[in-house]
Image (cartoon, rainbow, N blue to C red):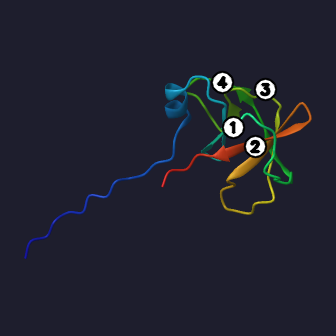
């Protein structure tokens, strides 16, 4: 009987380093270890409902080495982040309030 090892590819979620290395102008933020991206330059037109405040941006940074939770590449320090009406372990969409307008950020998950 011949036994062979099974090589499974490990799928990892995108990192700030990967995103910013590919596109230095990317509009991203990190929350709970996940990267969220503002992929469309439009307001909250999908109809997501702003729920509770889940944090605010601690630092604006484009450093690919020191990007941490609640860091953003474009958003200013103090910008508030809100959950939506979508209930999930990992929120797929969060809302950010910019000049009184709600803007969607979508989680980047592989697999």
* Within-10-Å neighbours for mark 2: few <14, some 14–19, many 20+: many
Asked if the residues shown at circle 1 and circle 4 are in contact, with their CB atoms under 8 angstroms apart, the answer is no
Q: Residue at x 69, y 37 (%)?
A: 38
Mark 4 and mark 3 lie on one chain; the one further toward the N terminus is 4
* Within-10-Å neighbours for mark 4: few <14, some 14–19, many 20+: some
Name the spot of residue 6 as percent of width and height, x first: 24, 63
Q: Residue at x 78, y 26 (%)?
A: 76
Callout in the foreground (2, 3): 2
Callout in the foreground (1, 3): 1
Q: Which mark is residue 38?
A: 1
Asked if the residues shown at circle 2 and circle 3 are in contact, with their CB atoms under 8 angstroms apart, the answer is no
Residue 40 sits in which quadrant?
Answer: top right
Residue closer to the observer: 60 or 101: 101
Q: Residue at x 75, y 43 (%)?
A: 104
Q: Is residue 1 left or right of residue 32?
A: left
Dot 2 falls on a residue whose secondary structure is strand
In this rendering, the answer to whether 81 lies above or below 58 is below
Mark 1 and mark 3 lie on one chain; the one further toward the N terminus is 1
Q: Is residue 94 left or right of residue 30?
A: right
Q: Which mark is residue 76?
A: 3
Dot 3 falls on a residue whose secondary structure is loop
Mark-to-mark CA distance, 1 and 3? 14 Å
Residue under numbered circle 4: 61
Q: Is residue 6 left or right of residue 81?
A: left
Q: Quadrant of the N terminus?
A: bottom left
Residue under numbered circle 2: 104
Asked if the residues shown at circle 1 and circle 2 are in contact, with their CB atoms under 8 angstroms apart, the answer is yes
């Amino acid at each position: 009987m011949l036994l062979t090892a099974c090589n499974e590819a490990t799928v990892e979620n995108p990192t700030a380093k990967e995103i910013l290395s590919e596109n230095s102008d990317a509009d991203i933020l990190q929350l709970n270890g996940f990267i969220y991206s503002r992929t469309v330059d439009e307001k909250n037109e999908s109809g997501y409902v702003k729920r509770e405040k889940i944090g605010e941006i601690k630092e604006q940074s484009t450093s690919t080495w020191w990007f941490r939770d609640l860091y953003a590449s474009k958003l200013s320090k103090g910008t508030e982040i809100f959950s939506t009406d979508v209930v999930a372990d990992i929120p797929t969409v969060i809302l950010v309030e910019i000049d009184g307008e709600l803007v969607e950020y979508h989680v980047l998950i592989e697999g």
